[in-house]
Image: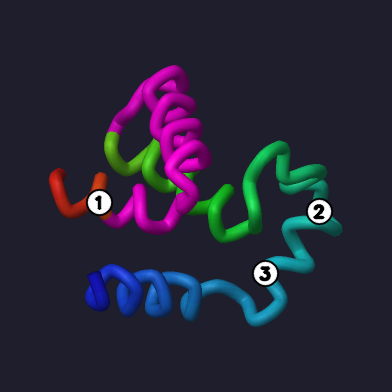
Amino acid sequence: MAALHEDWEILTGLFPPNWRGLGWRSGAIARLRGFRSQEDVLRTLLLHVGCGWSLRETAVHAKLARNRGGFRRHVDESVATI
């Protein structure tokens, strides 16, 4: 699991330093709608695109993660099984 955290740090390191602020100012993120952070929104989007999940499958994974109390843990487990 530490490797997945390191990969996330590498990925976000490629973004502009103020990427969180740009998300709000550009309107890409208007509200979090049940997500705890912009990182969780981004992880969901990347899983949707990267895993080829339908919107329904992505929504199910996001809802399961919220109900289980940790999106990052759920994502890490999902990616580990893929």
Position of residue 4 measured from the top left corner of the image (x, y, whole percent) = 28, 69
Residue 19 is tagged as 3
* Residue type highlighted by circle 3: Trp
Residue at 49 percent of width and 37 percent of height: 67
Q: Residue furthest right?
A: 25
Quadrant containing the N terminus is bottom left
Residue at 78 percent of width and 67 percent of height: 21
Residue extent of the magenta highlight: 52-76
Relative horizontal placement of residue 76, taking residue 35 as reference (left or right): left
Relative horizontal placement of residue 19, taking residue 53 as reference (left or right): right
Q: Main secondary structure of the magenta part?
A: helix
- Residue 1 versus residue 71 in the image, above or below: below
Question: Mark 1 — residue?
Answer: 77
Residue at 46 percent of width and 22 percent of height: 55
- For the residue pair 23 and 5, the one nearer the viewer reads as 5
Position of residue 40 measured from the top left corner of the image (x, y, whole percent) = 54, 53
Q: Earlier in the sequence, mark 1 or mark 2?
A: 2
Location of residue 5 by image quarter: bottom left
Q: Residue furthest front?
A: 68
Residue 26 is tagged as 2
Location of residue 76 by image quarter: bottom left
Q: Are marks 3 and 2 in contact (CB under 8 Å)?
A: no
